[in-house]
Image: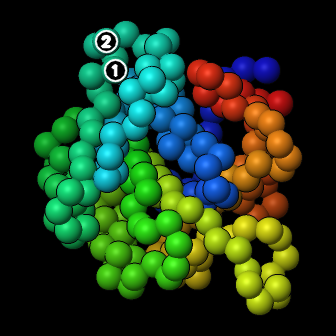
Amino acid sequence: MGRWKFQPENNLIHLAVEGSVGGTTLGLHLAANTIEEGGRVLWVGEEMPDNQRFSQLFKHLSLIDASRFHAMSFSSSFDKAVDAIIRALNSLPSVKLIVLDDWCSNSGKIPVNLIKELARLSKNVSSDIQLLLISKSTIDASGKKVGSVFARAEKAMSEHGFSIYLLTRPKDGPNRMISCNDNEFNLKLTETGFIDL
């Protein structure tokens, strides 16, 4: 059982997270992996990740390595945040991962203008940079779909080139599942990140 390495075929990823099962932790885990491999990370969210969780997930990195983690805020409008990310991409060397954590409201329909801004951002991201969007999942009230949770705006995000992943907790405890189409990763959430089961 080793530290989990995420190797998706697509660099554009929309991760829909069931409840509070570790979406931000997964983003930080991938950020630490990226930094360990020599890359730089842009983290964008309404608030910074919890200090204690950040310390746990980054404790195996040196302070110099950890300085390649750049946090930005959605404090102003979403389009201005996208502008700031694009500027940072043009000025910072070796960015390999961009994480937009909780980039939309936790429930309801995702506004069309946010999806348009994400499409604009994705056009400015080269294929060697991962763009990871983390948001809360939804349920299917109609009962027509197979499964328990789903990504919101799945069709629109797919049309803009994003692969849809789900992070779920199959049962109580530390086990988690990440799935995309027929691919499933069974993982265990630990204090220092995700490990393969």
Mark 2 surroundings within 10 Å by alpha-carbon count, few (fewer than 14), some (14 through 19), many (20 or more) = few
Q: Closest to the observer: 18 or 10?
A: 18
Q: The residue under label 1 is which amino acid type?
A: Ala
Q: The residue under label 2 is which amino acid type?
A: Leu
Look at mark 1 in the image and give the residue it sits on.
Answer: 66
* Marks 1 & 2, CB-CB < 8 Å contact: yes
Q: Is residue 86 left or right of residue 52?
A: left
Look at mark 2 in the image and give the residue it sits on.
Answer: 63
Q: Closest to the observer: 51 or 133?
A: 51
Please say if 31 is above or below 56. Answer: below
* Residue 31 drawn at (x, y percent): 45, 34
Please say if 30 is above or below 106. Answer: above
**Residue placed at 61% from the left, 27% from the top?**
193
* Residue 164 drawn at (x, y percent): 62, 65
* Residue 188 drawn at (x, y percent): 75, 32
Q: CA distance from mark 1 to mark 2?
A: 5 Å
**Residue placed at 17% from the left, 62% from the top?**
76
Task: State how the image is colored.
Answer: rainbow
Residue 158 can be seen in this image? no
Numbered tag placed on residue 160 in the rendering: none
Total number of numbered discs in the rendering: 2
Q: Quadrant of the C terminus?
A: top right
* Residue 140 drawn at (x, y percent): 73, 80
**Residue placed at 57% from the left, 57% from the top?**
15
